Image: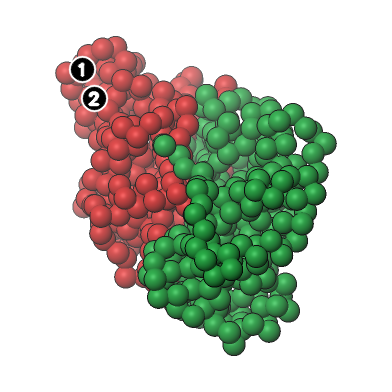
Chain colours: A green, B red
Amino acid sequence: MNQEFDAITHLFQARTPFRHPTTTLGNGDDASVHHIPENMEVVISTDTAVEGVHWPKDMSLGIAGSRAINAALSDLAAMGATPAWVWLAISAKDKPSLSQMSRGIVQACVTHHIELAGGDTVNAVVNSITVTVGGLVPKGAAMRRNAAIPGDKVWILGDLGLSAAGLQQWLQNKPSGRFISHFQTITPLYKQGIALREMGIQSCIDISDGLLQDLNHISQASQVGIDIDIHLIQKLDSYQNLTSELNAENALKMMLGGGEDYALCCTAPDTKHHLLTKLGAKHIGCCNKGSGVQLVQHGTMMDYNIKGYDHFD
Amino acid sequence: MNQEFDAITHLFQARTPFRHPTTTLGNGDDASVHHIPENMEVVISTDTAVEGVHWPKDMSLGIAGSRAINAALSDLAAMGATPAWVWLAISAKDKPSLSQMSRGIVQACVTHHIELAGGDTVNAVVNSITVTVGGLVPKGAAMRRNAAIPGDKVWILGDLGLSAAGLQQWLQNKPSGRFISHFQTITPLYKQGIALREMGIQSCIDISDGLLQDLNHISQASQVGIDIDIHLIQKLDSYQNLTSELNAENALKMMLGGGEDYALCCTAPDTKHHLLTKLGAKHIGCCNKGSGVQLVQHGTMMDYNIKGYDHFD
């Protein structure tokens, strides 16, 4: 699809001049070519955002563009990788839509110094943005979902629930709602991800579908049980922030199952307590020899029915 | 989008067990991790195919799935890269659509021994498949668009026009049309691409939007003029094949501007003549010190008005 590529070249290339030092052939050929230093590994992730599914139809397409890039960068954050390149696949209803999405995409690429290494634009009946991001991590050091062990504490870095509350306010036609900016502006925590990896953390995930649902991935991949302490959740700044407008039940619902948080959640042995605290991480639970994710209060298991977002259900 | 990832894991992982030797962390985490040998470079490309745009709405979604993978692999062929991994982003109207697309995708991944290293599935109003492919190429050896020089001959490997003629037959409701299989079945020529690269070819492109339009990319990137000899085009097997059903004018139109050929077009000095002929490549023109792409007949420039496919026009 070379002709559409021209559109991308035209729209993006001049405005995203950053070229990563690993790149030997950048945007404008059939593919990009990169030379990876021997002591590093390449980390790749793909994410799609669709209008009406991942962002409301009445929200700015520029915001949708920057959200798509930043959400993808959050996956690199979870691995402890340094972002390097992005490849775009944009479906646009028309040229104005393409142009508006491009504005947010360019802004995010420039902010985070990532190279636009290639892409494809097509005309379709719905606006959507697929972002493939690539980054670098020292050999063998990538954080993963399958490295939690019983006895690890569970830590959170970043906000929980504010984004979901913001989306709710937008959908309820409260354009001046105090949480809306938390939905519209994703801050990918890759600097914090790198810091976690550098302090020797091995197990991490980013919270995109809701805390409990994403923790379930760690639980399954690592074959550990995870207890999340409701009192520790209620001590988080996000809880204080949310309960200024929502009741306690709704605030917890947003924090435990709201999704689109792009917070980082890691597990670590007690020896990392001091370093994690210094980085601003908060302790919210523990890993054990059981299975599944449990909410506990005063040491007692709580029933909960908080599910993250699921397509095709 | 971890939950959708589960759908992919469920649908694809068991059926695409191939793991590339470079992969240190595969499908199922926030990103995949790969260790690239010091003497190799990594080559990445992204392509999107949308129902109703890149394939007719009444064509099988399984065929659409395999076409999407094979079209993406053709970009690696143009670089002379060996395919290694694929990351998927699938938008599906419903679960049956997802399942049908998956069948073709899995088949193509298995056929070409490529690893499904990650992906994302979302529910959307239109079916579409974005494929990011990655491969490996020896350091500094990737073929590119900007390496043609005046005096190079232009060579073609693969069919021209048969795919476009097949699409036309499908759209004209001729389900038994002899060219339809050429549209439905894309054969990515990466083995031929590797052979070209190994014989020292430096300049290559795959023909996805029509021969003349894609040659224009080489012309612009390399700052050379390109003359395509209509007599040499008429000597190709594809021309004989097409003119058994189409008149000469339509056959040429399909071959020069039809698109979706996924043939390889390279330029090379005369010293490569013997090797290229042995590989089955056909000489169709020459590079010169001018600019732009010209059709010539008996040494005279011909007018032509054959344009490739362009979105947003």
Image mark 1: chain = B
Residue that appears at 35% across and 52% down:
B9
On screen, A47 above or below B262?
below
Q: Say which mark, if any, is on residue B175.
A: 1
Q: Out of B201 and A30, give the one closest to the viewer.
A: A30
What is the quadrant of residue B123 in the picture? top left
Q: Position of residue B247 (x, y in %)?
A: 27, 13
Residue that appears at 72% across and 46% down:
A247
Q: Say which mark, if any, is on residue B180.
A: 2
Q: Position of residue A97 (x, y in %)?
A: 65, 29
On screen, A202 above or below B142?
below
- Looking at the rendered structure, the secondary structure element under dot 1 is loop
Q: Position of residue A166 (x, y in %)?
A: 71, 42
Q: Out of A76 and B85, give the one closest to the viewer.
A: A76
Task: Report whether A65 appears left or right of B124.
Answer: right
Image mark 2: chain = B
- Looking at the rendered structure, the secondary structure element under dot 2 is helix
Of the residues shown, which amino acid type is indicated by label 1?
A: Pro
Q: Position of residue A199 (x, y in %)?
A: 61, 82
Task: Report whether A56 appears left or right of B95.
Answer: right
Tell us which disc is closer to us: 2 or 1. 1
Q: Do the residues under discs 2 and 1 have CB atoms within 8 angstroms?
A: yes
